[in-house]
Image (cartoon, helix red, strand yellow):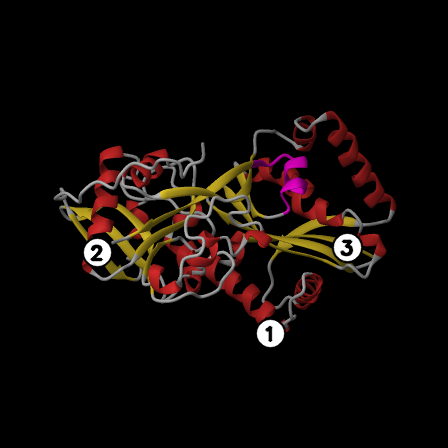
């Protein structure tokens, strides 16, 4: 049986113990209402970092009670397909992104549907590849159902033909259950990788890996050292021409068109947005030349690995990607009070082999009458 088999019939929208509304932007006091344990990327500074990924910019979809929010998400109405491999709800839910590993194995609840059957679509999506409800009642089953009822009512009143939610985290089952109860199809969308820091030092990290992988890690690090490669870390600088050069290489490798100005702008934006004290560059060098780097952003006790690059023209860059992405961060994390590292989407096998856990994010879809 799949998650689409015999869905429960949509329940009638009932009167709410609160008010549902959609408003432009994200409130300045958003973080005060996140609730304990909310993922870092659901905070305001992470939303505003990449809100251009949400068509029309971020909007707040909120069920409020009294003077404050009860449950809230980010997203908003989308008028037409964008074609984006991960952010276009029609492409994602119709099977148009399977070649890129998105809803790769189906089922595809919107397969064969035309755009005018789906749009306008109300999209629920935080812009950093993970979505979950926030607010003091985010984990309350009754509040989750009330939120979904309010969302459906608002969408019908405002001419939406469908509702979609992308990148839904599995650790908010109350919200997923509320969606299914109200008739949404939920399907596996993409896998993301994270690593909890449970070791006191690098030896502890290696000891936690499978036996064959422990030998492989030690062998890779010996090979790097014998080639005279040095692994170190530093803060991000005002200008980073070497990082830009390696970013251009990785864009070219995967079939894109390199844009040095864009890459430099992204690095400056990260530095300004999070503060240079929270952005760390882990790099591998040989005779002063940069071979690989990873860029880590700190938010509380979490590191998010946001960017990397390797000089594919240098044979001595072998294994340096793993050293800067995994081994040196694993060594540094317990010293700096880091308790988790977010590795995001893609390259699952490499991440799993080096200690990451994999969680499947879901997509949800509902067609409105």
N-terminal-most mark, 1 or 2? 2
Residue carrying label 1: 261
Residue 48 lies left or right of residue 294; in this view the side is: left
N-terminal-most mark, 3 or 2? 2
N-terminal-most mark, 1 or 3? 1
Task: State the separation of the CA atoms marked 1 and 3.
Answer: 24 Å
Residue 70 lies in quadrant:
top left
Q: Residue at x 23, y 62 (%)?
A: 159
Crowd class of label 1 (few under 14; some 14 to 19; many from 20; radius 10 Å): few
Residue 112 lies left or right of residue 155; in this view the side is: right
Secondary element at image label 1: helix
Residue carrying label 2: 156
Give the magenta range: 347-357
- Of residues 82 and 53, which is closer to you in this image? 82
Crowd class of label 3 (few under 14; some 14 to 19; many from 20; radius 10 Å): some
Q: Establish if 260 lies above or below 174.
A: below
Q: Position of residue 346 (x, y in %)?
A: 60, 48
Q: Position of residue 179 (x, y in %)?
A: 31, 41
Residue carrying label 3: 285
Q: Position of residue 244 (x, y in %)?
A: 66, 66
Task: State the separation of the CA atoms marked 3 and 2.
Answer: 58 Å
- Of residues 351 and 261, which is closer to you in this image? 351
Residue 63, label in figure: none
């Amino acid at each position: 049986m799949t998650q689409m088999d015999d869905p429960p019939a949509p329940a009638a929208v009932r009167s709410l113990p609160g008010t549902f509304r959609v408003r432009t932007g994200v409130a300045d006091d958003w973080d005060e209402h996140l609730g304990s344990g909310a993922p870092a990327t659901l905070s305001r500074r992470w939303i505003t970092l990449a809100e251009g990924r949400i068509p029309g910019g971020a909007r707040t979809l909120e069920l409020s009670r009294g003077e404050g929010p009860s449950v809230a998400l980010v997203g908003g109405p989308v008028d037409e397909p964008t074609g984006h491999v991960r952010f276009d709800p029609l492409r994602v839910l119709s099977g148009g992104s399977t070649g890129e590993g998105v809803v790769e194995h189906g089922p595809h609840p919107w397969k064969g549907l035309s755009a005018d059957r789906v749009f306008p679509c109300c999209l629920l999506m935080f812009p950093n590849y993970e979505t979950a409800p926030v607010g003091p009642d985010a984990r309350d089953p009754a509040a989750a159902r009330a939120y979904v009822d309010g969302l459906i009512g608002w969408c019908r009143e405002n001419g939406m033909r469908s509702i979609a939610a992308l990148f839904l985290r599995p650790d908010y089952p109350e919200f997923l259950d509320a969606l299914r109860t109200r008739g949404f199809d939920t399907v596996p969308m993409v896998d993301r990788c994270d690593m909890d820091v449970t070791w006191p030092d690098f030896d502890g990290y290696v000891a936690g890996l499978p036996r064959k992988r422990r030998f492989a890690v030690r062998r890779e690090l010996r090979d790097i050292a014998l080639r005279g490669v040095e692994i170190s870390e530093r803060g991000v600088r005002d200008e980073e021409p070497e990082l830009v050069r390696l970013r251009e290489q990785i864009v070219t490798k995967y079939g894109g068109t390199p844009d040095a100005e864009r890459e430099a702008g992204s690095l400056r934006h990260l530095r300004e947005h999070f503060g240079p004290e929270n952005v760390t560059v882990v790099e591998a060098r040989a005779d002063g030349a940069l071979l690989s780097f990873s860029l880590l952003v700190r938010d509380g006790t979490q590191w998010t690995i946001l960017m990397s690059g390797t000089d594919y023209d240098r044979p001595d860059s072998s294994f340096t990607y793993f050293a800067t992405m995994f081994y040196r961060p694993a060594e540094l994390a317990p010293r700096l009070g880091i308790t988790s590292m977010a590795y995001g989407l893609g390259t699952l096998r490499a991440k799993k082999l080096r200690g990451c856990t994999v969680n499947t994010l879901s997509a949800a879809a509902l067609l409105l009458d």
